[in-house]
Amino acid sequence: MFKDNRYLRKGLLVGVFEVPLAELGSGANNIVDFSMVPFKNVTGNGSTISATYKHSGRGLDALTDSFWFNTKEVEGLLEKSAIRFPQIAEHRDEVMAVIKDWYNGYHFGRFRGKHNPWSVCAFIECLCSQLESSEHGEIQSVPDAINSAARAYWVATGTADLIEQQFINYRDQAIRLMESLIREYRETRLSGLDHDLALSNSQAVSLQLPKPNMNIISSGKYSAEGMLTLCLFAGYLTHKHPDSVCIPNHEVYNVWCTLFTRTLLGTGFTERSDVNARGSLLVELWEGKTAILSSFINEAFGTLTNHAKYKEKHYANIVAAVLAAASCLGALSHPDQASSHTSHAVTTRENHTGDGRCDHLMRLYSTNNQPNQFGVLIEFKLIPQEKRDNIKHHEVLAKEALDQIIEKKYPACLSGCTERLDIGIAIGSNVVHILTQLHKLDAATKKWIPVECLTSSAS
């Protein structure tokens, strides 16, 4: 289309990699590359500026600011929508806050804080539709309508199958990479900081490449740069600095959570809404129940192992990985926490305490939202391969694990805790049986008292 076309004077290619120079007589040598990668120079005209910056309307600034929406353009759309729905103008700050959280955060050239145009338009259209429904008798408050309209739009127009396949091919490395990206987002964007301040404070993941190169992912070898480049040009990451990337917003963050859980735990995990709610696993543990924990472990077996020769420590490592994933995704956060970045639970393995070594130890939030005051002690017993179909034997082993926690005085390591859960797990090849016992510390006697439940609302 461009080469040897006598009817074409100028052309603009959008959304492509840098065009390499061809041989001298090809007719495609006079190409100018306008990169969307942020400038490395941070002085003069190369400094990073806000998407609200009023540039001259000429040159590279005008070109890069033409991509996606800046804040003024979003505000203009809301002003036009408010002509028909004045509630939008009345709740302008709330609407803008939701749009920034869900669809902002992209970095092009010198401009940061760009909005995804497809998602912004779809959000406003959905919001207007809900406000119109309210006028026809479907009563809904404006804040509820705003929050209801906040959902994934752009990411729903396609799939991340290519990215997911790369993660599956290099699973161990991909999990570490995704943990870094998700943790960085949670500790900055979900921490309650001002939007622009959170971006400037974020510890983005390094992307050390002279120029982005997608050929790396087809080399047959693992490359963090190749994975990050793929995700960057697919829109699932953005440049924080010229040599680093981060998750841009909540819409894309949800995709990363799904990719992480599918890679670590398998597809079944993401299909259950009850395990994805904030604090879902923690609340269940307060009640002495294990349905979600069992689901996590069983799903992990399908992804991580089906090995008859695995030993107890191998299964314990799997459970540790499951708990770390659940914590990273908020399942071990307190439901009343404003942010979940402080509740990242670290599982201590082979902890020396009392008269032995407890397999797993965690300190979580107590029912009254106090950090490190709910102790969880986990002991494992291996189910022999020849006993994997003997349910009664599974129960006996789980009971032995539960009793060992008391006999070996493992609770001695829970200084400062006021609530405790003992978990005995009989585990084997695709088989798991769990027993639990809750305890509460008596303030007068300083002794642990067995209880049925730690929450008054539990059945």
Image (tube, rainbow, N blue to C red):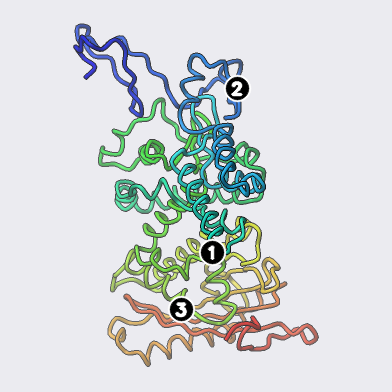
Q: For the residue labelled by badge 3, is the local secondary structure a helix, a strand or a loop?
A: helix
| Residue 348 shows in this picture | no
Total labels: the figure holds 3
Amino acid at pointer 3:
Ala
On screen, residue 83 above or below 167:
above
Q: Identify residue for label 3.
A: 291
Q: For the residue labelled by badge 2, is the local secondary structure a helix, a strand or a loop?
A: loop
Q: Which mark is residue 54?
A: 2
Sequence-earlier tag: 1 or 2: 2
On screen, residue 244 above or below 130:
above
* In-front residue for pair 17/168: 17
* In-front residue for pair 348/142: 142
Query: What's the distance in space between the residues labelled 2 and 3, CA to CA?
Result: 55 Å
On screen, residue 296 above or below 130:
below
Amino acid at pointer 1:
Glu
Query: What's the distance in space between the residues labelled 1 and 2, CA to CA?
Result: 42 Å
Residue 413 position within the rendered picture, expressed as x and y whole percent measured from the top left: 65, 73
Q: Residue at x 19, y 6 (%)?
A: 25
Q: Residue at x 51, y 59 (%)?
A: 329
Amino acid at pointer 2:
Lys
Mark 1 burial class by Cα count in 10 Å: few <14, some 14-19, many 20+: few
